[in-house]
Image (cartoon, rainbow, N blue to C red):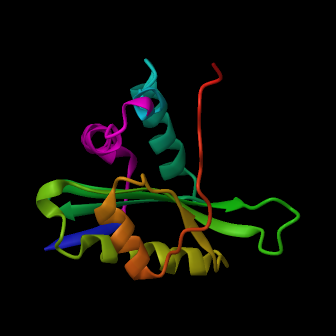
Amino acid sequence: MIKIIDAKLNDITDLMKLWAEFMNLHNKISFIEKKQKKYYKLADNAEDTMETFFTKNIINKNKQVLIAKDNKKIVGYSISLPCTAPPVCDITKIGLISDLYISPPYQNKGLSTLFKNKIFEWFKKCGIKHIRLEVDPHNENARNIYKHWGFFEQKIKMQMEIP
């Protein structure tokens, strides 16, 4: 039986393997358009940076790192944290789902909904009623899941290199 639980510091090695898997899969989806490729290229120190990010977020009780465990194997993770919108907005307290990834053999089995339920429960305990996330426009599976949950498209981010 797969359980969604809080990540611990001793999970970081396995989390890093899963994060690398996520980046590889993300790159396959995202590189449909060649001009996007340079914006997804990881920095030379990306692994160290991500390991530090996991560590800080696991330690910080104002942030949430969840893992999906199938017996002793980590098969998915999420990172959620509170953030603020610009002070000119009426709603300033917002939750951010930074990452949500499930290893392909475990996808389409309802795990993302289990993550969502834990994440939403945690945000409610934090007094957060509004949640934001970003998703690659080519990741149709994730977009469909998020829309099914009630998320809607609010902004379109655009990017370019100055010639």
Image quadrant occupied by the N terminus: bottom left
Residue 115 vertical placement versus 33 (above, below): below
Name the residue rendered at 29%, 64% in the picture.
141
Main SS of residues in magenta: helix
Up the image or down, 127 lies above or below 71; here it is: below
**Quadrant containing the C terminus in the rendered view:** top right
Q: Is residue 92 left or right of residue 99?
A: right
**Residue toward you, 125 or 141:** 141
Highlighted magenta segment, given as a residue range:
6-35
Q: Quadrant of residue 10?
A: top left
Residue farthest along the right direction in this orientation? 88
Residue 132 is a magenta residue:
no
x and y percentages locating residue 85 in the rendered image: 75, 61
The residue drawn where x is 50% and y is 40% is 53
Q: Quadrant of residue 27?
A: top left
Q: Is residue 83 visible?
A: yes
Percent of width and height locating residue 143: 38, 66
Q: How many marks?
A: 0
- At a point 23% along the width and 76% down the height, the residue shown is 110
* Residue 115 seen in render: no
Image position, residue 154 (x, y; %)? 61, 67
Q: Is 34 in the magenta?
A: yes
Residue at point 42%, 54% (across, down): 137
Give above or below for 162 relative to 33: above
Please tell me whether residue 25 is drawn above or below residue 78 in the rendered image.
above
